[in-house]
Amino acid sequence: MNHRNVKFVQESKHIDVEQLNLFENTDIMSQDLKYPRRNVRSIGSKIFQLDAPNERISQTMQNIGSSNTSIEKIIERELLYRNINFSKPELLIGDLEGKPDFVIPRFKIAIFCDGDFWHGKEYVKGSIKRNSEFWDTKIENNVLRDEKVTYNLKQKEWKVFRFWEKDIKANPDICVDQIESYISAKSSEKNYVFTFVDLFAGIGGFRIALEELGGKCLGFSEIDKNAINIYKKNFWALNNDDEKELGDITKLSKLPFENIDLIVGGVPCQAWSVAGNMKGFEDPRGALWYDTIRLIKLNKPKVFVFENVKGLIDPRNKENLELIIENLESAGYHVKKPQLLNSYDFGLPQNRDRIFIVGVRKDIESQFKKFSYPQPISNKHFLKEIISGIEENNLIHDKVLNPELIHGDKIPRGRNRFQYLDRLNEFFIFCDTRNGHTTIHSWDIYKTTKREKEICMIILKNRRKKIYGNSDGNPLSFKVLSSLIEDLKLNELELLVSKKILRKVSDKGYEFVNSKNSSGINNIYRVYLPHSNIFSTLTATGSKDHIALIDVHAKDPKEYKLKFINEVIKKKLHRPITAKEAGMLQGFPNWFSIHKDEKIAKKQFGNAVSTLVVLNLIKSILATNIFNKNDGTRKVRNN
């Protein structure tokens, strides 16, 4: 046995000896219990009357943990020593049956450390004399459960390793050798369609899609330590020389690979986003485009694909985008006209517009004539398919209504594609500066009188009128408000100030406290209903958007809004999405392991690319046969 595990084995022996001999030790049966224990237990539909255990049995049983056991620690220590990247099952996006002790996400490996006694190793029926029928049934039930779990995991293409306590303690090296041999065998399969390099890799959104389509990663570049940790945990089961960690892109030149098929990357986008004040190349993150172009020029892949925020095609960034394309063209590439692709159009319930830039090397561009950006797919999903804890119902929500019933005689302009003219919106906005059939104002949810609501609505309707000032929302003086509101009293406004609906602006008048649209009310901006096909764009900085945990429907806007307030808001049946749900909104698979810190995990998914968008885009590239080779050096996978 390897010396590094000897101490763990020695420390765990005393519990195991007690555990196995516990029921035969008659000299302790006379010890009384300090506190009464239950004497009725059930297993399935069977109910057992039990003799109460003595104090020593009770204490020993309590000391036998179901997690982080001594044998788990031995295997964990060996995995760490071998540099095998593993995860705990609770960090996977999807629930995994049986709750294995460890998982290796990249190869869908589930590892169980089974205690000999509890899992029935060489168990002889009737060998436990005390409460014999109960223990026989329990151990038998455990064995059947283990068999079922193993079978079901295998059906879902998980490789299952089950190690007995006795074998782990005898020689953990042999146990982990089996895992390492399996990983090495799977890693050596040279069954790929194309090679790629993953720049600005983040946590691997591009890679998930590329590997699904037969891509082989040669190396990745990333500098964020948390992202690197998650990337390796999910894609590097073993540290090996087959793939390179490239490090900081600013320090890279000629890469140690020949004949690269594809270079991809989500070039940091903050420099071009509204949230980043659109500083472009003035921002150091924007200047990373120069390093990206330099690497393309030096390494000459057949094709490149880069992703960025919608802001890059904003008219204010027109010259910057033209400069990027001009430099890529000068590096020897024909650049296709950049195109916006939305995650919603490719099967994900998220309104996420991103620009994609595709280029092909000029000496082979004739092979790329058939390329076109992917068209939206018809398969759409609802939030309720992703979000947990939502009350199920079969309500129909696509009822077409007369637009005048929803909007009145003034049909709004400038509405986005997810705000319908003839249907009720699938989300509510919390905002005191706008109005609409699914707008919730502070006076809708705070305790206010009918008169106070009327005052607020008059302020709302007049605050942007040019006759009162040039601001996008002018403070209105008491004099102005008195001309608009009959018999207005100053104390009526002051009472609304005390309720934190209005605030007094010195020498100017009164305005709404919640005067910025994106700030929302009470730290909530939007609440999406379960039947919505979208959630708002995930970002690294997070959002103030929630999901309702029950659905509501109604025959008209007034009833719709009232039901939402009474059934969702007042009952607090709404919440932010979790990090795992953010991963699903980005199309990450169930086997993917997230960061243990919820905030960091959410940030990472906000920075990630939507995997299904990449999947469909790369399918369009593969359809050109640009990566085909006929020299026998590469196997082409049949999908």
Image (cartoon, rainbow, N blue to C red):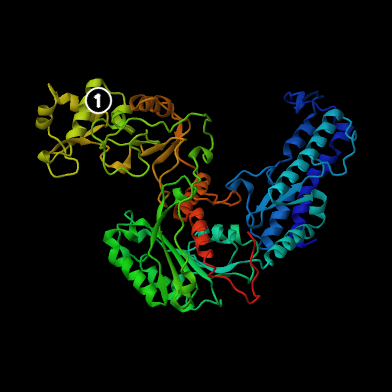
Residue 429: x, y in percent?
34, 37
Taking depth in this image into account, of 57 and 202 the one nearest to the observer is 202
Residue 353: x, y in percent?
39, 53
In what quadrant of the picture does the N terminus appear?
Answer: bottom right
Could you tell whether 309 is left or right of 73 in the image? left
Residue 507 visible to the viewer: no
**Is residue 567 placed above or below 637 in the rendered structure?**
above
Taking depth in this image into account, of 52 and 541 the one nearest to the observer is 541
Could you tell whether 102 is left or right of 453 in the image? right
Residue 458: x, y in percent?
19, 29
How many other residues sit within 10 Å of disc 1, few (<14), some (14-19) or many (≥20)? some
Tally of numbered discs: 1
Q: Residue at x 32, y 70 (%)?
A: 323
What residue type is disc 1 on? Lys
In what quadrant of the picture does the C terminus appear?
Answer: bottom right
Residue that badge 1 annotates: 453
**Is residue 510 placed above or below 166 in the rendered structure?**
above
Q: Residue at x 73, y 36 (%)?
A: 62
Residue 243 visible to the viewer: yes
Task: Answer with the quarter of the image where residue 452 lies.
Answer: top left
Q: Residue at x 48, y 61 (%)?
A: 224
Q: Residue at x 81, y 36 (%)?
A: 139
Residue 98: x, y in percent?
70, 42
Taking depth in this image into account, of 57 and 193 the one nearest to the observer is 193
Q: Secondary structure at mark 1?
A: helix
**Is residue 254 placed above or below 198 in the rendered structure?**
below
Could you tell whether 499 is left or right of 97 in the image? left
